[in-house]
Structure formats: C-alpha cells, structure tokens
Image (cartoon, grey):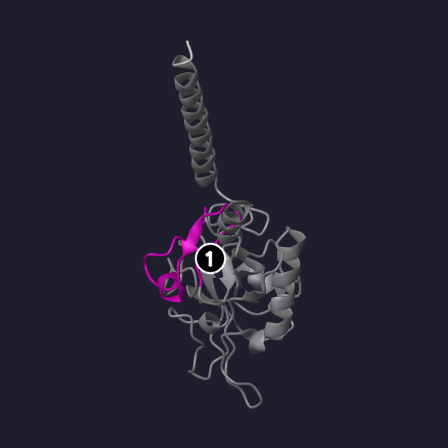
C-alpha cells in the first residue's frame, strides 16, 4: 500500500499544475481579444462629424461678418449639435483688395479626411475634395444636425451654397466681385456659389463649389437665385 501513496501525490500535483496553466492561458486569450476603451474611443472620434452645410445662415444675405464671422457661425452651429474639441472653418475664399490678401478656401479647412454627421466620409484629403472622386451629394452634404438641405425640385430650393471660389478651391483673381465684398456686403455685388445637389444651371451646374454667380448679396437676392445664405463648414483638426 505504501508504494501507491507517492504516485497518488505526484499525479495530484501534476493535475493541479495543468489546471492552473489552462486557467492562465484562457484568461490571457480573452484579454487579448477584447478591444480597449482607448481603441473604441479612437474609432468613434475618427468618424465624428467634421463637415456640414450650415442649417441656417446669419440671415443678413452674404454679409457674414467676413471670414471671421463666418467661422464663428460654423463653430457655434457645430457645438450646438454636440461637436467638441474641434476647430471649424467656413469654406470661403477671400479676394485680394487694398487692405486684404487673397485667401483660398481650400487652404483654410485642414487636411482631412472629413465625415458628415452620419459618419460618411465625403473626402479623404484636400485633393480628393476637389476631384471627381469626392462623395459630396444632396444625400451626403447635410446639415450639422443631419438634416437634408433642400435642392432643385424642393420648395423652397436652397441648393446655392456660398463659396466665392473657383473649381480648385482658390480665390478669383480677375478683379471682379465673387465674394460680396469679402463677405461684408448685403447689397451690391455678387457671390460665387456651388450646387450641393450637383444639378441646376450655370457654367458648372454639377459643381458643388462653383456653379454660377448670385444675382446680388441681399438675402432676397440669394433666395431669388436658389439659395439661402448657407455655406460649407469643415473641421481643421
């Protein structure tokens, strides 16, 4: 009988060791498979809203208070919709004048990528944004709260979006007014507009950024040519 006791003890020790080893292996495997809180937060942040069309304009025609005033409006709308920690800029160009340099809309908006409030990537970079590969459309170019902006065929039509820019996102240099006095006029002048729904009239009817010029700079003039004083906002970071 004494010969079996050491054998029994040895088997017991080996069994306990294998059980402990198996338990450790299972725990390590489960830990590796679970994504960390930081990884989940990063994935959410990466597709957070970084692009929208203003749901409303300031209400004074194309007088946006200059580029600074337009940026403030973008920031306020974004934060009211729940955006935090981002710097917002209006996609607007400024023409060179006696006391102001030319500023290109494309140079104001960061490097991308940009997502709408539904998490859809509308462009991966500045070059992509100004190419035929971008995803700007009536369905994707939505407001900060995720609402569709009225387009051609809707009542009222609001598809004219202020940009003051050429096809490549740069300011005009022909000496004409394409920015309603660098976004300080609600009367005389004209603003270059794009069609967010990619349809309509003008020299470039399917362009989101430079379809045609507005009739004037007042709120009534903007409404009369199919707009409402709305413009694009992009997060720079």
Q: In this orientation, which residue lies closer to the viewer: 223 or 111?
A: 111
Q: Secondary structure at mark 1?
A: strand
Magenta segment: does it hold 132?
Answer: yes
Relative depth, front residue between 94 and 200: 94
Disc 1 target residue: 114
Q: Main secondary structure of the magenta part?
A: loop
Taking depth in this image into account, of 83 and 134 the one nearest to the observer is: 83
State the residue lying farthest toward the left: 132
- In the image, the segment drawn in magenta is 112-139
Image point (51%, 61%), residue name: 161
Name the residue at 64% across, 51% down. 82
The percent coordinates of residue 47 (x first, y second) are: 49, 50
Q: Within the image, what quadrant is residue 181 found in?
A: bottom right
How far across and down, in percent of the image, does residue 88 sit?
Answer: 58, 64
Can residue 121 be spotted in the picture? yes
Quadrant (top left, top right, bottom left, bottom right) of the N terminus: top left
């Amino acid at each position: 009988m004494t010969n079996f006791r050491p054998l029994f003890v040895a088997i017991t020790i080996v069994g306990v060791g294998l059980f402990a080893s198996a338990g450790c292996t299972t725990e390590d495997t489960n830990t590796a498979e679970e994504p960390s809180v930081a990884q989940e937060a990063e994935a959410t942040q990466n597709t957070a809203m970084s692009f929208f069309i203003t749901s409303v304009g300031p209400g004074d025609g194309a007088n946006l208070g200059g580029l600074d005033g337009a940026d403030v409006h973008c920031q306020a709308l974004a934060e009211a919709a729940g955006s935090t920690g981002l710097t917002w800029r209006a996609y607007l160009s400024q023409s060179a004048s006696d006391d102001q340099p030319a500023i290109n809309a494309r140079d104001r908006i960061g490097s991308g990528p940009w997502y709408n409030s539904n998490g859809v990537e509308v462009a991966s970079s500045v070059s992509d944004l100004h190419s035929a590969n971008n995803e700007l459309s009536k369905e994707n170019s939505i407001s900060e709260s995720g609402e569709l902006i009225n387009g051609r065929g809707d009542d009222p039509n609001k598809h004219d979006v202020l940009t003051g820019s050429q096809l490549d996102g740069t300011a005009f240099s022909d000496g004409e007014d394409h920015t309603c006095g660098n976004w300080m006029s609600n009367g005389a002048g004209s603003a270059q507009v794009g069609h967010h729904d990619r349809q309509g009239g003008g020299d470039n009817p399917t362009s989101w950024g430079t379809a045609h010029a507005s009739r004037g700079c007042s709120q009534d003039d903007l409404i009369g040519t199919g707009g409402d004083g709305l413009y694009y906002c992009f997060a720079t970071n």
